[in-house]
Image (tube, rainbow, N blue to C red):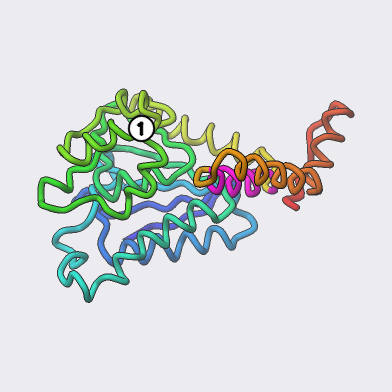
């Protein structure tokens, strides 16, 4: 269900059911989880890119015909794979990019928002239409509430109204909106920019970025002060500062 490819330091995870608009079935979630672990464990991978096959959909959300809702209690753990995937993406220490080549709905919208950078085509439709079938977008709310302003998010979830990419960009759910024929170039440029940075700084930075979201101001400042010290004692920080002083390109070790 998911095609996995590694090239030039980039792992690309492609949901590969374009004829069905790349839905999230139990098997697809298992594959996404497995390949994300594989990419995080691979020292040659610097950036993870999530996308969908074809040019119609990034991911249409939960596969309503694929068994994911067949047994509300019995399938509880299998549906929880989406939560495990979000945890890995957020806390895995490597930057992630959503290559949004088409519609991103429901769980697909959550997958998109769980990525660090989101590059989206201008003709996509985005949002949480679950309420239209009597379901609330539960798991993805944890990510969306940290990405989209409260009132706009509640309106979207309560009405099922879809967003244009321009609206999503204004709300902070999307990093860049491009024409379809510019998508691959924009993703490549973003991946190269991320891969050029210190792996140690990115890992520590992502960890502190997400952790501080749930802390009060005093605890947050104390936590970030410790994070700064932890960053400064890495070999990458020492190399980066030396390279700046010596006016040369840094040679990152990732430690």
Is 82 placed above or below 211 here? below
Q: Residue at x 46, y 50 (%)?
A: 12
Residue lying farthest to the right in this orientation: 246
Residue 177 left/right relative to 12: left
Foreground residue among 38 and 54: 38
Quadrant location of the N terminus in the rendered image: bottom left
Is 187 placed above or below 21 here? above
Residue 162 left/right relative to 2: left
Q: Residue at x 28, y 36 (%)?
A: 153
Secondary structure, mark 1, is loop
Is 34 placed above or below 22 here? below
Q: Which quadrant of the view contains residue 157?
A: top left
Q: Residue at x 51, y 35 (%)?
A: 188
Foreground residue among 223 and 56: 223
- x and y percentages locating residue 221 in the rendered image: 65, 39
- x and y percentages locating residue 23 in the rendered image: 24, 54
Residue denoted by label 1: 149
Residue lying farthest to the bottom in this orientation: 74
Is 38 placed above or below 168 here? below
Q: Which residues are magenta?
A: 200-212
Foreground residue among 146 and 96: 146
Report if residue 43 lies within the magenta region: no
- x and y percentages locating residue 120 in the rendered image: 36, 32
Predominant secondary structure in magenta? helix
């Amino acid at each position: 269900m998911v095609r996995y490819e590694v090239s030039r330091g980039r792992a690309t995870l492609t949901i590969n059911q374009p004829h069905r608009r790349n839905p999230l079935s139990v098997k697809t979630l298992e594959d996404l989880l497995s390949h994300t672990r594989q990419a995080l464990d691979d020292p040659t991978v610097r950036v993870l890119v999530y996308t969908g096959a074809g040019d119609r959909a990034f991911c249409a959300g939960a596969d309503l015909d694929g068994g994911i809702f067949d047994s509300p209690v019995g399938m509880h753990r299998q549906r929880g794979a989406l939560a495990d995937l979000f945890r890995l993406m957020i806390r895995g220490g490597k930057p992630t990019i959503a290559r949004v080549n088409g519609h991103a709905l429901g769980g697909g919208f959550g997958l998109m928002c769980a990525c660090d950078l989101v590059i989206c085509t201008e003709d996509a439709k985005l949002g949480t239409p679950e309420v239209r079938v009597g379901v609330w977008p539960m798991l993805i709310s944890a990510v969306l509430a940290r990405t989209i302003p409260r009132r706009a998010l509640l309106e979207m979830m309560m009405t099922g109204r879809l967003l244009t990419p321009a609206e999503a960009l204004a709300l902070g759910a999307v990093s860049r909106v491009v024409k379809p024929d510019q998508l691959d170039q924009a993703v490549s440029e973003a991946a190269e920019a991320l891969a050029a940075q210190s792996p140690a700084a990115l890992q520590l930075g992502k960890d502190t970025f997400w952790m501080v979201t749930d802390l009060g101001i005093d605890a947050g400042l104390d936590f970030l002060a410790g994070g700064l010290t932890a960053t400064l004692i890495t070999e990458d920080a020492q190399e980066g500062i030396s390279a700046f002083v010596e006016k040369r390109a840094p040679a990152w070790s990732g430690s």
